[in-house]
Amino acid sequence: MQATSSHARPFVSLVGAGPGDPDLLTVKALRLIQSADVVVYDRLVSEEIMALVNPNSELLFVGKKLNHHCVPQDQINQILVDKAQENKHVVRLKGGDPFIFGRGGEELETLVEHNIEFEVVPGITAASGCSAYAGIPLTHRDHAQSVQFITGHLKQQGQDIDWPSLAHTNHTLVFYMGLKQAPVIRQNLTEHGLSLQTPCAIVERGTTSKQRVLTGTLSQLDQMASQAISPSLIIVGSVTTLHSKLNWFNV
Ligand code: SAH
């Protein structure tokens, strides 16, 4: 379905913008941001991507940073409803994929309550983008038979995570929002069976021209995390040792 600015009814496109490199936008995402009436976006959407947005559209920044909630989620939900009910085509643009640690589901539930039609356009999630651009395959026959995406935005010192199920050597772990909780992550993984020598990596500002990759072992994770800036992903597992071999291209 093509949503255009001539929409005669409320319509919201929940669109994933990918991890930063504008070339990783989907064709559909690009078409939608070029035709939107209103674009509601957050901090993780890169400047290069915002430069591609329809210059005549209304731009609403609702950026959030950990502990600095600029616009609370319920207000973001209400903005989407209010703008759509003006019979505008609203593009809700989110970093990465809207359904991976993006609270996209909550926004859609509000739209459903208000009988507002919507579509969801997936984006490349940070784990896929960062691992590709850092030369770290998330699975590999010799290293990892499974991969798991975990939020590092933990409650109660990480009590809400099933740590024993994560601490396996043939498994890759990708922690989103994990920088501040790196010591808790390191402590729980090693208490539940991973060696302090387990390889890990941090990919900072992945897929952008400022991408930086730090590698080491779990024993060094706290120090690595203290040197990294947001947004960063923590990848734990022996696949991260492939970075030095496969990181042959520049962003
Ligand atoms: N929906 C997003 C994730 C939002 S949570 C997605 O699918 O990618 C925000 C977290 O994503 C950040 O704290 C960071 O851990 C990760 N992240 C997003 N973009 C990133 C990037 N370009 N480089 C490294 N990590 C990134």
Image: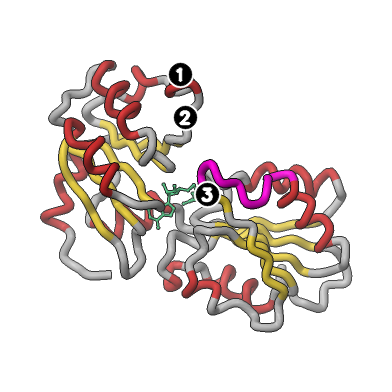
Kindly tell me whether mark 2's CB lies below 8 Å from ligand 1.
Answer: no
- Please provide the residue range marked out in magenta: 65-74
Q: Tell us which disc is closer to us: 3 or 1.
A: 3
Q: Position of residue 170 (x, y in %)?
A: 23, 30
Q: Which residue is mark 1?
A: 159
Q: Amino acid at mark 2?
A: Leu
In this rendering, position of residue 126 left or right of residue 197: right
185 shown above or below 94: above
* Residue 134 figure quarter: bottom left
Label 2: state its secondary structure.
loop
| Cα gap from disc 2 to disc 3, whole angstroms | 15 Å
Q: Residue at x 47, y 61 (%)?
A: 18
Decide: marks 1, 2 in contact (CB < 8 A)? yes
Q: Amino acid at mark 3?
A: Lys
> Residue at the bottom extreme?
55
Q: Residue at x 34, y 58 (%)?
A: 206
In this rendering, position of residue 142 left or right of residue 191: left
Q: Earlier in the sequence, mark 2 or mark 3?
A: 3
* Residue 212 figure quarter: bottom left
| Cα gap from disc 1 to disc 2, whole angstroms | 8 Å
Label 3: state its secondary structure.
strand
Q: Is residue 17 magenta?
A: no
127 shown above or below 24: above
> Residue at the front extreme?
68
Q: Position of residue 238 (x, y in %)?
A: 18, 38
Q: Which residue is mark 2?
A: 154
